[in-house]
């Protein structure tokens, strides 16, 4: 999982795909953190993205570093613990202007039953399960 985290951090931006009914939705994200041995992302509860994940936790993220790309698929599970939210916001202090671990909007999700595949045109794909 650490390799997945480092790849996503290097990319800076990744794209999160969720499902809204029968319509896929994709949007850019930038938050990724490791807390309590799990890979986390963050958003606001009021955003459509969070509502879609509550309705259907299956999601996939994709990022490209210029020569290789990663796809991470799994279930995103909400974590309401203050410590999990604080860890994410400590990793991204610029978000503290919009979010707080003590507000009713901040939510972090961690990947469960995830499979990451790192691919490139130069090498065979590498699969990481966590």
Image (tube, rainbow, N blue to C red):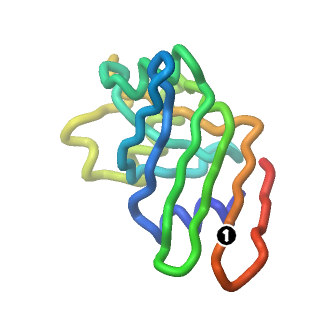
Foreground of the two, 54 or 102: 54
Residue closest to the eye, 108 or 81? 108
Horizontal relation, residue 102 to residue 34: left or right = left
Point out residue 107 in the picture as x, y percentages from the top left corner: 43, 28
Question: Which type of secondary structure does the marked residue at label 1 adopt?
Answer: strand
User: Pointer 1: what residue?
Assistant: 119
Residue 18 x/y as whole percent: 49, 32
Q: Position of residue 40 (x, y in %)?
A: 56, 43
Residue 102: tell me if it is visible: no
Query: Is 111 on the left or on the right of 22, as rendered?
Result: right
Around disc 1, counting alpha carbons within 10 Å, would you say few (fewer than 14), some (14 to 19), or many (20 or more)? Answer: some
Question: Closer to the camera, 44 or 81?
Answer: 44
Count of labels in the image = 1
At 68% from the left edge and 85% from the top edge, which residue is drawn? 122
Outermost residue, front side:
22
Q: Residue 30 at x, y = what percent? A: 39, 53
Residue for point 39% across, 59% down: 13
In the picture, measured across the screen, residue 120 lies left or right of residue 53, that is right
Residue at figure coordinates x 22%, y 36% from the top left: 98
**Residue at 49 percent of width and 74 percent of height:** 65
């Amino acid at each position: 999982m650490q390799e997945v985290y480092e790849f996503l951090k290097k990319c800076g931006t990744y794209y999160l795909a969720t499902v809204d009914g029968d319509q896929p939705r994709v949007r850019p994200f930038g938050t990724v953190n490791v807390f309590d041995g799990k890979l986390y992302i963050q958003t606001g509860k009021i955003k459509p993205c969070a509502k879609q994940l509550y309705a259907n936790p299956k999601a996939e993220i994709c990022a490209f570093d210029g020569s290789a790309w990663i796809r991470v698929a799994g279930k995103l599970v909400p974590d309401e613990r203050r410590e999990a939210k604080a860890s994410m916001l400590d990793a991204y202090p610029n978000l503290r202007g919009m979010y707080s671990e003590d507000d009713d909007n901040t939510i972090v999700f961690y990947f469960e039953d995830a499979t990451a595949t790192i691919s490139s045109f130069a090498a065979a794909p590498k699969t990481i399960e966590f």
